[in-house]
């Protein structure tokens, strides 16, 4: 995950949950609400903002990210985004 506009703002995160509108990740640090981030996963860049940060014992923080754009294979999609299509189990 990369924090937009912050040099060195790159973190290894684990995607925990995915919904049509966003995702929850486990991150070693908390980020302020409204922080713009880009999560790269499964060949896509999910762009959005932090909606919540919850302290989780021993695991760092759970961050909720509301997605507002998706870049995949060079194409940017705005508006209706269904992230469950990216994370389908085959």
Image (tube, rainbow, N blue to C red):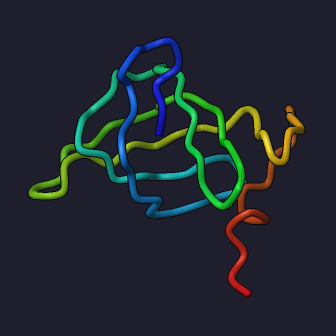
Q: Residue at x 61, y 31 (%)?
A: 48
* Rendered view: 55 above or below 89: above
- Closer to the camera, 16 or 71? 71
Q: Quadrant of residue 31?
A: top left
- As drawn, the residue found furthest toward the bottom would be 90
Q: Residue at x 47, y 40 (%)?
A: 1
Residue 90's x, y, as percent? 74, 87
Q: State left or right for residue 11 relative to residue 5.
A: left
Q: Residue at x 42, y 14 (%)?
A: 6
Q: State left or right for residue 76 relative to residue 33.
A: right
Residue 80's x, y, as percent? 86, 42
* Rendered view: 80 above or below 85: above
Residue 34's x, y, as percent? 48, 20
Q: Quadrant of residue 68?
A: top right
* Rendered view: 68 above or below 33: below
Q: Residue at x 59, y 60 (%)?
A: 18
Q: State left or right for residue 69 relative to residue 14.
A: right
- Closer to the camera, 39 or 22? 39
How many tags in the picture?
A: 0
Residue 35's x, y, as percent? 46, 20
Q: Quadrant of residue 47?
A: top right
- As drawn, the residue found furthest toward the left would be 58
Q: State left or right for residue 23 relative to residue 77.
A: left
């Amino acid at each position: 995950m990369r924090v937009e506009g912050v040099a060195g703002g790159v973190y290894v995160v684990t995607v925990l949950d995915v919904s049509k509108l966003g995702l929850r990740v486990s991150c070693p640090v908390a980020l302020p609400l409204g922080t713009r981030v880009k999560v790269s996963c499964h060949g896509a860049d999910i762009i959005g903002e932090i909606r919540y940060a919850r302290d989780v014992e021993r695991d760092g923080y759970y961050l909720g990210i509301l997605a507002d754009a998706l870049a995949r294979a060079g194409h940017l999609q705005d508006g209706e985004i269904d992230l469950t299509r990216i994370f389908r189990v085959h």
